[in-house]
Image (tube, grey):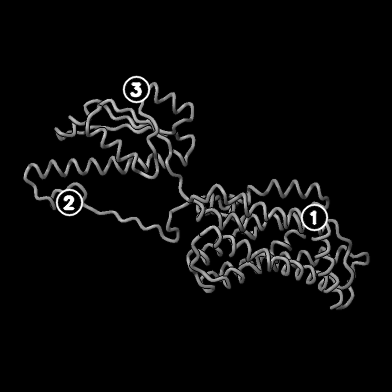
């Protein structure tokens, strides 16, 4: 027990006494908490600048432009006389789309014939492209349906029948677990887990490389270090996974207890993985470069930016070794989808299996590092 407490104190001392480790584990988390969520606070991209080229110059074309401009997704910032001027505005990045209303637009509608409206969007910036298409396509379809229904009614069709012919099925969109259908609600919970993992791996690996060999039985030494991580992240993990999501207004259908139950094996598995990586790379400059390099692969292998169904099987197998993979899935199910602990027990067992496997390797490495390689009895 004395060896356990000594290892716990030594680990905490190694974290707080080392300036570089403090910057990684503590200061970096504060910086990430402020800077990373900032671009996503608005949830949705709004008022994307679009140019309108109205070659018809009719009442109907003006009404169409007004409806498109009323959409929250786009804003008609300029009326260009022709496509040459509109194209120049897009090339100068003063606009990200062009709405072209052709000559004869109103006349074609009144005759009951098709009148194509061209919509150009900058596909080099996918978010802009998506919002331009969504913001302009809906008003165009609605106006077309209204014109067609009015034409049918003028021909003597009953209003109810005309509306049913134009729009036979009413579409109701319900964004489950993400009421605003926003990007922040989707990306931030997973990003917070990855930030915790990355800073923990790098900081604890540096502590492991710089520490002196522990005294006492390797089991007590290892348990003492694990106790230090649990004490430290008993503060940092709830701050990142409970307080920050609430501060940024992310929806939460779960309970803090579920997050903490999931967080315990995640912290242990990540800390033990850091010990294994420190033993493999052995030098601080090497472990920093390696962990910086694997940060982006860990991001994609976690399964939320690159769908798990699309990840090749051999890469998906590697992803299961990384603690963030089951932790992100379990956290999203618990906090955003309201899953109970019984419903995420496969992720809990996954994390505990990783923690146990890394603990066995860390114990062997600790035992091997002793001069006599023969541990005393506990």
Between the C-alphas of marks 1 and 2, the distance is 68 Å
Q: Mark 1 packing: few (<14 Cα in 10 Å), some, or many (20+)?
A: many
As drawn, which residue projects farthest toward the right?
Answer: 372
* 252 horizontally vs 371: left or right: left
Question: What residue sits 89% from the left and 69% below the top?
Answer: 215
User: Which picture quadrant has residue 345?
Assistant: bottom right
* 326 horizontally vs 200: left or right: left
* Residue position for label 1: 206
User: Which picture quadrant has residue 60?
Assistant: top left
Question: What residue sits 53% from the left and 53% below the top?
Answer: 187
- Ranked by sequence position, the earlier of labels 1 and 2 is 2
Q: Which one is in front, 47 or 205?
A: 47
Q: Secondary structure at mark 3?
A: loop
* Residue position for label 3: 82
Q: Is residue 312 visible?
A: yes
Between the C-alphas of marks 3 and 1, the distance is 61 Å
* 341 horizontally vs 132: left or right: right
Q: Which one is in front, 317 or 243?
A: 243
The image shows residue 365, relative to residue 168, as above or below, that is below
Rendered-image quadrant of the N terminus: bottom right
* Residue position for label 2: 164
């Amino acid at each position: 027990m004395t060896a356990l407490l000594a290892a716990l104190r030594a680990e905490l001392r190694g974290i707080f006494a080392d300036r570089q480790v403090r910057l990684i584990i503590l200061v970096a988390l504060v910086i990430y908490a402020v800077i990373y969520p900032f671009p996503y606070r608005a949830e949705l991209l709004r008022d994307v600048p679009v140019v309108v080229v109205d070659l018809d110059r009719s009442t109907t074309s003006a009404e169409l432009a007004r409806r498109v401009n009323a959409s929250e997704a786009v804003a008609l910032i300029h009326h260009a006389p022709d496509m040459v001027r509109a194209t120049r505005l897009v090339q100068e990045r003063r606009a990200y789309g062009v709405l072209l209303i052709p000559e004869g637009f109103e006349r074609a509608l009144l005759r009951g014939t098709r009148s194509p409206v061209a919509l150009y969007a900058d596909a080099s910036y996918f978010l802009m492209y998506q919002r331009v298409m969504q913001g302009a396509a809906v008003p165009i379809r609605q106006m077309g349906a209204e014109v067609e229904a009015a034409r049918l009614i003028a021909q003597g069709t009953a209003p109810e029948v005309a509306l049913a012919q134009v729009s036979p099925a009413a579409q109701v969109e319900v964004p489950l677990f993400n009421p605003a259908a926003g990007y922040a609600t989707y990306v931030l919970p997973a990003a917070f887990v990855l930030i915790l993992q990355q800073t923990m791996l790098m900081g604890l690996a540096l502590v492991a490389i710089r520490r002196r060999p522990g005294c006492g039985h390797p089991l007590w030494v290892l348990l003492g270090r694990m106790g230090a991580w649990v004490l430290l992240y008993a503060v940092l993990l709830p701050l990142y996974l409970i307080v920050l999501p609430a501060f940024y207004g992310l929806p939460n259908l779960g309970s803090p207890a579920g997050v903490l139950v999931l967080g315990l094996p995640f912290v242990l598995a990540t800390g033990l993985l850091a010990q294994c990586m420190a033993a493999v790379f052995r030098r601080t400059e090497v472990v920093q470069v390696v962990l910086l390099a694997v940060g982006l692969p860990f991001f994609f292998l976690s399964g939320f930016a690159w769908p798990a169904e699309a990840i090749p099987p051999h890469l998906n197998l590697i992803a299961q070794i990384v603690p963030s993979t089951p932790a992100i899935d379990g956290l999203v199910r618990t906090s955003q989808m309201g899953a109970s602990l019984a419903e995420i027990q496969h992720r809990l067992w996954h994390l505990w299996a990783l923690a146990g496997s890394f603990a066995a390797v860390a114990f062997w490495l600790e035992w091997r590092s002793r001069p006599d390689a023969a541990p005393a009895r506990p």
